[in-house]
Image (spheres, coloured by chain):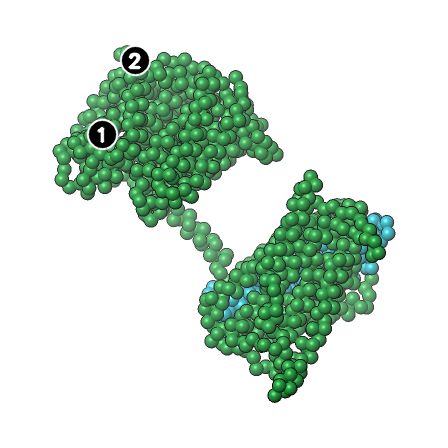
Amino acid sequence: MEATSDMLPLIVALPFLGALLPGIVIRAGRDTCTWFTLFPTALALLMLLLHAPGVMAGEVYHWRLDWLPGLGLDANFFLDGLGLLFAGLILGIGLLIILYARFYLSKNDPMGQFFTYLLLFQGAMVGIVLSDNILLLLIFWELTSLSSFLLIGYWNHLPEGRQGARMALAVTGMGGLAMIGGMLILGEIAGSYDISVILQHKDAIQASDWYLPALLLILLGCFTKSAQFPFHFWLPHAMAAPTPVSAYLHSATMVKAGLFLMARLWPVLSGTPEWFYIVATTGLITMVIAAVIALFKDDLKGLLAFSTVSHLGLITMLLGFGTEAAALVAVFHIINHASFKAALFMTAGIVDHEAHTRDIKRLGGLRHLMPVTFVIATITALSMAGIPPLNGFISKEMMLKETTYAAWAGNPWLVPALATFGALFSVAYSFRYIWHVFMGPVRDDYPARPHDPGFGMWAGPALLAAIVVGIGVAPFVVEPFVNVVAGAVTGAPQDTHLKLWHGVNAALFMSIAAILGGALLLASHRALEAGWLRAGPPAAKAIFDAIVGAATRAARGLTDGLHDGSLTRFSAIFVVTVTLAGAIAWSTGEIGAPSRATLPIAIVPLIATVLLVGATLCLVAFHRNRLLALVLIGVVGLTVAVGFAYFSAPDLAMTQLSVEVVTIILLLLALNFLPRETPRESSGARRLRDGVLAVAGGGAVAALAYAMMTRDFALPSISSYHLANSYKGGGGTNVVNVILVDFRGFDTYGEIIVLGIAALVIFALTQTVLRGAGGRFLESQGRPGGEAGDRHPLMMVVATRVMMPMALMVGVYIFLRGHNEPGGGFIAGLIVAIALLMQYMASGFAWAEARQRVPYHSTIALGVLIATATGIGAWFNGVPFLTSAHDYFTVPGIAELHLSTAVAFDVGVFLTVLGAVMLALWSLSRMARRTGEPVNVEPMDVNPAADAASSREG
Amino acid sequence: MELLVAIAIGVMTAAGIYLVLRQRTFPAILGVALLSYAVNVFLFTSGRLALDMPPVLVGDEYATGTYADPLPQALVLTAIVISFGMTAVVVLMALGAYLSSRTDRSDIGGEAESEARP
């Protein structure tokens, strides 16, 4: 049955939205903060539970939203039994953990941050289990890796915390990358990225040649996330996290994400020999090895971590068997494990919190001091050991029974024997948790005097312990639910009867053997431990660190070899690479015969070329004299401008001309502070090398340019569209300007923003330089002066004053005609900037600045804002951003007036260009002021009017 | 005529590369400026050369062959303005580096050290 539910996306979104709150409301106190964290979680849980009756009745809820349909990435969610189980675990245990964390975290821990991370993680987990699109699922998957990184490293002042977090991120992140590949293959085979569709294509997927690669890659993701051998080592190191995190992420939720995915994809991936041998074997090995290691861990959380790894292995193995009955047991054990393990982690946290140590060797006898904790820990640990009448017993019994049906390579007793062996150790470490921590004599050397915590802290684990007993005594209560979930996993309805007493069968004997053997193991723990320490099992962390270290060294070697910080070196590498790439393309590609008639060489362009080439060569020859080099580069720039004008590009010529002026002023100002000469320091061989590189690069570009110019377009150009529609669509006859402000307005919008950013960068750089050593250096230098007699010559001041209004008028004229004749915002902005700069040059920057009201920052901002507003205005016409509108008006007595919204956009361009140019130059002038350059009161050095006035007074 | 323009582009590129490979900041800035001229002209010529055909519409004539290609011109126009922004940032970086470290060498360590020795 299918149904739509609009609540599904809300359930996922609520934790994310809620994550915004704790960081803020922590100002109102820790309790308020906790309430604001509990609230979104509880609300999401409530909304989830509203669906529970429907799901139990066999309903599957869907919600779909096309997000990026072209990529197959859609925000599709669905909720069935499996999703309900996991989402319920995540939100339900989440509630208990939040409550527990409120009392666990000390006053010095930033609680707002903690709850924000926790809710982010919660949202990502709920997202995984409710996604109906594997690409969406991958996004949430990566989000859990990131948020768990933040949570594990929450105590970032502890090196173990940071290392553990990095290791977890590296391992799970790597698995996540592999999984992306596997999921994409899976989606390609099935023809859809929707899980509900993929689940229909079992035969196609298992018949595909790509089945095995996809399976391996997906399993790599699942195994790393669920800490399966040989990727199990990150989980114990992640125990550096605060205990609420360990209890939540590393028992109930995140490490189960891998299991969830295996269960989710079980119908299409399982049932093959590959699946059985990879999954069941990995699970079995993990279960046994981790159980053995767990027995020899002295750290309470370390013991629990390895026991978690072992139980995850157990569930993996059950899923790997590929039978429906085993899948049902896996589901049941997921529920049971979450209940007892979360409670155990919380009791470990309580012990740590109260006794200030989690070292088993320093504990013992706590049953008298912490009776409540003792009861909870004992019940849950016994369940972990599989003692009746607790829930752990039932699922373990069922697990052992399933192993008797699994034949490994035709060998019927290997799996059951190893499973019993693992169970034996499981019993041993569970007993040890009770015996070595709570039993025995009371000691007098605890780091702190242990006592039971407040109700808030033990309420959560107590509730879980009650569930442990409840399910154990009355398994029929959860029976329908387990059947529904198992039905969702297997895709076929399940009707298994859960009961405590299974009769006298093989599983019972295996269980009894495990319990007796476990007790025996614990009794001889001391001797075994000595042997274990002598054997010195390999430390996974050392291996991991060695691999990471080697990778880092290799990466650093490569990077440092290519980019050692020498600008000339990597410029040279760049030139060589690009030239070689061009040469290869040229020699392997096909180039047709010249198809375009060349223009005849006229005398004026010939002279201009000689001038340009001559100036460029002189520039290279005399570049050590920096002022001369500036003059020469000015010649080059002006010749280029003339060239633009000659080849039918008046707009470019005007732009180049005005940019040339401001560039030269800028460089002149900079040269004021820099050395006037460039010393000769390159060796002859070095100059020869550079010369060869330069000639090769230049020659290649020239050849390419010539080849391009002598051939017609290979494909029809889109320029004809612009020419044809410039007037009709854009309302302007100057096609270049119409392209800038209309056809390609969005590009221009980006360009002015970049220009504005460049100007702000310049401002910020100046600020930094002036504040630091640079500023002190400038002060110590003193003003450079003394080279020119008049700093503000009378003639220049008068001339620029006269020119100011004229230049402004030209600017306005150029701006207004821009749409139809050469001109426009860019050029007008530059012209007005030059008009202002003339005043600055004549009377000094400080003098001019004192008379200038609007700061350049605001000019830039205003320009960008006007352009944005124009763009947004188009939305109100129901058309996309920056679509222009225009019309013709007749103003009586003047002329026909053509108004286009593009003009407003051009105003934005104008203001940004003006502001950016002025801000850049003003920043340089601030450096000059820092040298102690005096600020003149009079606009010019010799002011006849002022002199006359003073002589009259005198 | 195409040959002349190609030579001009090539010479500017070569000079730009040579100057960028110098070890002081000021020549490198000049080199970058030269390279941006060269790149702008190169981009401009991708519309092919045209004489006396500015892309300003006259009357009702919209045919492609009667106007210079407007698209490269529009691209180059913004490129010229942006290259001013870039040059200004590079100049300020060079200036800041010089004022803070009292040297306008662009290479500290690495290749420069070995080559600086006579």
Q: Nearer the viewer, residue A224 or A440?
A: A440
The total number of labels drawn is: 2
Residue at x-position 22% and y-position 27%: A375
Chain bearing tag 1 is A
Q: Could you tell me the amino acid type at mark 2?
A: His
| SS category of the residue bearing label 1 | helix
Identify the residue position indicated by label 1 in the image: A372
Image quadrant assignment for residue A568: bottom right
The answer to whether dots 1 and 2 both sit on one chain is yes
Left or right: residue A211 versus residue A430 is right
At label 2, counting other C-alpha atoms closer than 10 Å, the crowd grade (few under 14, some 14-19, many 20 or more) is few
Chain bearing tag 2 is A
Residue at x-position 27% and y-position 32%: A455
Left or right: residue A343 versus residue A130 is left
Residue at x-position 20% and y-position 28%: A521
Check the image and report above or below for A625 versus A578: below
Measuring from the top left, give residue A407's x and y in whole percent: 36, 19
Left or right: residue A579 versus residue A359 is right
Q: Is residue A53 visible?
A: yes
The quarter of the picture where the C terminus of chain A appears is bottom right
Q: Could you tell me the amino acid type at mark 1?
A: Val
At label 1, counting other C-alpha atoms closer than 10 Å, the crowd grade (few under 14, some 14-19, many 20 or more) is some
Q: Is residue A222 visible?
A: no
Which one is closest to the eye, mark 1 or mark 2? 1
| SS category of the residue bearing label 2 | loop
Task: Tell me the tag on residue A502.
Answer: 2
Q: Which chain is green?
A: A
Between the residue at mark 1 and the residue at mark 2, the CA separation in whole angstroms equals: 32 Å
Measuring from the top left, give residue A301's x and y in whole percent: 28, 36
